[in-house]
Image (spheres, grey):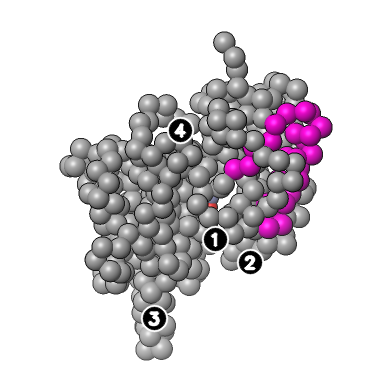
Amino acid sequence: ESKIVILGIETSCDETSAAVLLNGSDLRSHIISSQIKTHQKYGGVVPEIASREHSLHFQPVVQQALDEAELTFKDLSAIAVTYGPGLVGSLLVGVSGAKAMAYAAGVPLIGINHLEAHVYANFLEHQDLEFPLLALLVSGGHTHLILFEAHGRYKVLGHTRDDAAGEALDKVARTLGLAYPGGPQIQRVAQEGDAQAFKFPRAMLEADSLDFSFSGMKSAVLNTLNSARMRGETLSVPDIAASFQQAVVDVLVHKTLMAINRTRVKTLLLAGGVAANKLLRETLDRTLAERGVRLVYPSPIFCTDNGAMIAAAGYYHYLEGDFAPWTLNAVPGLGF
Ligand code: KG4
Ligand code: ZN
């Protein structure tokens, strides 16, 4: 029986991560070095600091992943690395490092689209997924509804026209004085809040559109906060957090149901950092169960940026013989 061993590497934003994956689902090691603490004092990711941190941590993280898997470069079938989208300096650390290692070890290189990998995080823990699959990708940089007809064959049905869902949560959190990244903080304080306290708008756009728009919803919150401040009032942070979280989830669920009705898929994959959100999971769980649609989502550790999802996507590219040339470059604006 042949073994396919993929080393997955992720450096697109503020996580340096490497994982060794055997045959697509047997995770032999998974190292994540997070820079969140470093960026927290600036309220967001500082690109220049991020690339320097990746340079410092790249080699030790990769070495630790190999050591924990009790493997060397010679045992690898391929090295898969994120080449976009993301911060150019951060991506370049991963891409150049992976190229150098793959070339030196004589193993093939696989270039991975970070967005696709978020969706493939679902295959790590579920081997029984059957196409067609609908994916809701909600992260700090992206909000997409994607129809997967087969491995590597997908269509974007809708996407955000401005802010991503996570970005809007992060910005509102920042204004509320909550730490970066804001999504988990909003979720935490919202537990003590009343989701009906504020009637924030739900941007649904044109009736037949599967696109999203979170910028106006975010501005509505900021305006509410500013005018209260001018009146010398202080509003309840938990109430604002709960009401805004509810508004974001309402829109995500509404558009997802529209996409399900339109495509008649039987399985929805949640993906991206915001997929870790408890309200979103619970609401989808309930509404999809009523419609006989299966909801699948990765464990929280595989929702935010990680090397395992890169290896998971890499595995399917490997099976298709889809390798990257040595000229592979970082593509910061890579789309679907
Ligand atoms: O996928 P990810 O790690 O990075 C990108 O590719 O963007 O997503 C990060 C985003 C951030 O906006 C963060 O606030 C959000 O995911 N996030 C959450 C939760 N955990 C992370 N949002 C809501 N609820 C959560 N539990
Ligand atoms: Zn991501």
The circle on residue 223 is 3
Distance between mark 3 and mark 1 Cα atoms: 21 Å
Sequence-wise first label, 4 or 3: 4
Distance between mark 4 and mark 3 Cα atoms: 41 Å
Please name the residue that numbered disc 2 is placed on.
42
Of residue 12 and residue 39, the one placed in the foreground of this image is 12
Name which residue type carries label 4: Phe
Picture coordinates of residue 83 (x, y %)? 64, 48
Name which residue type carries label 1: Tyr
Name which residue type carries label 2: Tyr
312 vs 245: above or below: above
Q: Are marks 2 and 1 in contact (CB under 8 Å)?
A: yes
Of residue 83 and residue 321, the one placed in the foreground of this image is 321
Sequence-wise first label, 2 or 3: 2
Name which residue type carries label 3: Asn
Of residue 163 and residue 99, the one placed in the foreground of this image is 99
Any atom of ligand 1 within 8 Å of the CB at mark 1?
A: yes
Which dot, 4 or 3, sits closer to the camera?
Answer: 4
The circle on residue 331 is none
The circle on residue 123 is 4
Please name the residue that numbered disc 1 is placed on.
180
